[in-house]
Amino acid sequence: MPAREVEDPRTRDLVARAILENGPMSAVVLSEKLGFTPAGIRRHLDSLVAEGLLVAREPHVVNGRGRGRPSKVFVMSDAGREKFEHSYDDLAVAALKFMQAQMGPEALMAFADSRAADIEGTLAPIIDSQTSSAARVDALAQFLTAEGYAASVLPRVQGEELCQHHCPIAHVASQFPQLCEAETQAFSRLLGTHVQRLATIAHGDGVCTTYIPNVSHTPTGGIR
């Protein structure tokens, strides 16, 4: 089926929402995902960049393979996150504030731990099936990317750095850092080593980065 032409002005919001939820994307990938022509997608991308809601940048390349210059990818700017995230996130913030006021900070921490436990429950069998530290970190990055965090892995001295280029809950986490803390502890338990958060989007950094030292494989055995 041929790609549709972009006529509906609501398509602009669809383009922005796709990048918000999936992380950095090129015009070609957006065209394929949304079913519109590349030319139509680029018009909306140009408009969103001009308004400061998106930023065009060179893609992260893991290795030097491939021919030609890779296409630019588009990422959500801080202004874009504020515009497109807050309508949903404000309700979540209000709910968590109500929970904290009515039931105390322990209830909020219990919610953060429950969310982390859900991550562990899903990932533990996948992580345990890997036989190397690098494979386990790659599996974690793939899971996070599927969840909209646009994750990648960079080699570091005696370890690796997990980079999350997007955070779907950044606005909420900026007010409730317990979510980030519980998530970091979940990563540590899953990978069998102490991991260190170096930066977070929720605290104003451009990317969430986590240093993960190399360790021998020890099955997590799921959540205890």
Image (spheres, helix red, strand yellow):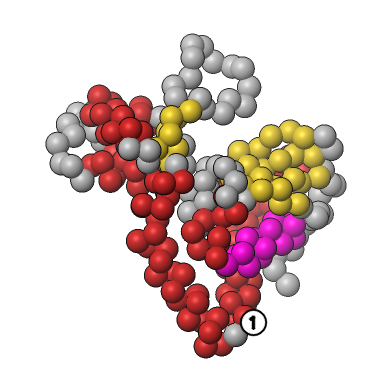
Q: Quadrant of the N terminus?
A: top left
Which residue is tagged 1?
106
Q: Quadrant of residue 86?
A: bottom left
Q: Residue furthest bottom?
A: 102
Q: Quadrant of the C terminus?
A: bottom right
Instruction: Say above or below: 212 vs 3.
Output: below
Instruction: Say above or below: 66 vs 162.
Output: above
Residue 190 shown in magenta: yes
Image point 60% across, 54% down: which residue? Answer: 203
Task: Look at the image and give the residue range highlighted in magenta.
Answer: 176-191
Secondary element type, mark 1: helix
Task: Say whether residue 221 is visible.
Answer: yes
Q: Residue furthest left?
A: 7
Image point 66% across, 65% down: which residue? Answer: 182
Residue 78 in the figure: left or right of residue 204: left
Q: Nearer the viewer, residue 19 or 172?
A: 172
Instruction: Tell me residue 114's x, y (percent).
Output: 60, 72
Q: Quadrant of residue 151?
A: top right
Q: Nearer the viewer, residue 57 or 4?
A: 57
Task: Say whether residue 41 is visible.
Answer: no
Image point 18% across, 42% down: which residue? Answer: 9
> Mark 1: which amino acid?
Glu
Instruction: Say above or below: 215 vs 119.
Output: above
Instruction: Tell me residue 171's x, y (percent).
Output: 49, 59
